[in-house]
Amino acid sequence: MESKTFITPAVKLVAVDDTASSLELVAESLQQEGLAIYTSTDPEEGLDLVFHEHPQIVLLDLVMPKMSGLEMLERIIAFDPAIDVILMTAHYTSETAVEAIQKGACDYLNKPISIPALRARVERLLADARQRQRALELDHELLESSRFEGMIGRSPLMWDLFARIRRVARHYRSALIVGPTGTGKDLVARALHNLSPASGGRFVTCNCSAVVETLFESELFGYVKGAFTGATADKMGLFEFAHGGTLFLDEIGDMPLATQAKLLRVLQNQEVTRVGSVTPRQVDVRVVAATNRDVPEMIAQKQFREDLYYRLAMVELRTPSLAERKEDLPLLEKFFLERFAVQFDKPIHGLTRRAQIVLARHSWPGNVRELENVLGHAAMMTMSDTLDVEDLPESIRRPEHWKAEAAAASLAPDAAGSFEDHERELLTDALQRAGGNQSEAARILRISRDRMRYKMGKYNLR
């Protein structure tokens, strides 16, 4: 696999002050390699800069026309609480300083600004920002090194699974994969095939839960012309089709007992007999079965053949639930967001800290598949380059509220529309809340005014 080069971006700083001379002094004093400085004397333009450039550090004057520094502070923290905001004022009071800190400011400086003091405080913030960037670089390198045959993981459980796959792939003839729904059993089956001597052959999938019981034998083993009504020609079964490769039997717990007996004979003899024929045909097929059900319990209830289980379970692999490998959550989030950024053609850079906390607290009963759906929803709905809590589905943000309304929602007609419908609805709602003010609507959506105008033109909104 070709590795990707991670280029460290410059740290960004936005300074907003209605006095141009103060901005010039700040910019000249802080100018250095690796720091991009943006300035504005207008609070609204300053907010646009923050939304568009997504800086790590913001310097704000407390008293400005149109909008105070505290109001700007609230909007910036609402946009991304990870941004470090320093307030500057010539009218210091302890009450205002406490209020600023409570609202999310990281520091409070008196004017006239002491340049050495400003440099020292900004240098500390720059060191923190560069440390976070280095952490992102390491996360990127870790993600690249944690990929294995389409799977992502660095937890001990996943490392053990990867090691077991490598050991058995060259030798197995049949294997059983067990684990909860949504844990990637199909990816394990594919990995076994790719690393086996049969990798040059076909990888054929049969979803046993989707096959009608009376058609199982003809699907797996094929039939000859005249075997039953409608059999107008010979038909090859999946075993013959997978000759020289691998047959993946997903949800094998739903296979009828009669078919299980015939499957066992195929595994033992490596030959199949088409329905209506008496002539066996030799096949060379590796068989991987998967189920999310408790097979020993099914055997006790006479729903699964014990001899078939022992034949398959000569190699048994278990896929862990996401709750058992929570340390893999940040890697999986990064992997899916990179994929959705390409799929939706959006500049999605990551998650806010509070969104990460919400996802970390979730129990993930649907495992990795649920995480993929949640992040796909958020990536589709967001109007920003960073996913926040409000972009997540209602069931993740407020699970108890969602449960209380789930029954009523299930009775309502399906309101899901296209991506464009949802985006138009978000834009229209923001414009209505802002009384038609485009700048205010852009702030509500956490996007720049230019992007707001582009979206309005795209959907012909006035």
Image: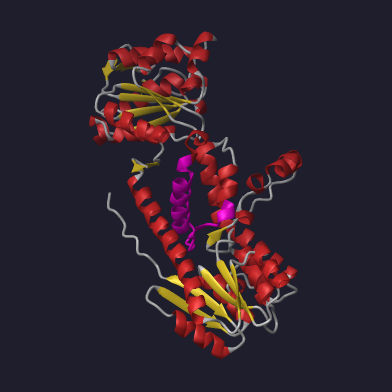
* Magenta-drawn segment: 327-355
Q: Is residue 281 visible?
A: yes
Q: Left of 218 or right of it: where is 173?
A: left
| Looking at the image, residue 341 lies above or below residue 216 | below
Asked which quadrant contains residue 15, the reply is bottom right
| Looking at the image, residue 11 lies above or below residue 306 | below
Residue 127 drawn at (x, y percent): 43, 65
Q: Residue at x 34, y 12 (%)?
A: 265
Q: Residue at x 68, y 42 (%)?
A: 399
| Looking at the image, residue 59 lies above or below residue 159 | below
Magenta stretch, main secondary structure, is: helix
Assign the C terminus to one quadrant of the image.
bottom right
Residue 201 drawn at (x, y percent): 26, 33
Residue 168 drawn at (x, y percent): 28, 26
Q: Is residue 449 visible?
A: no
Q: Residue at x 62, y 54 (%)?
A: 389
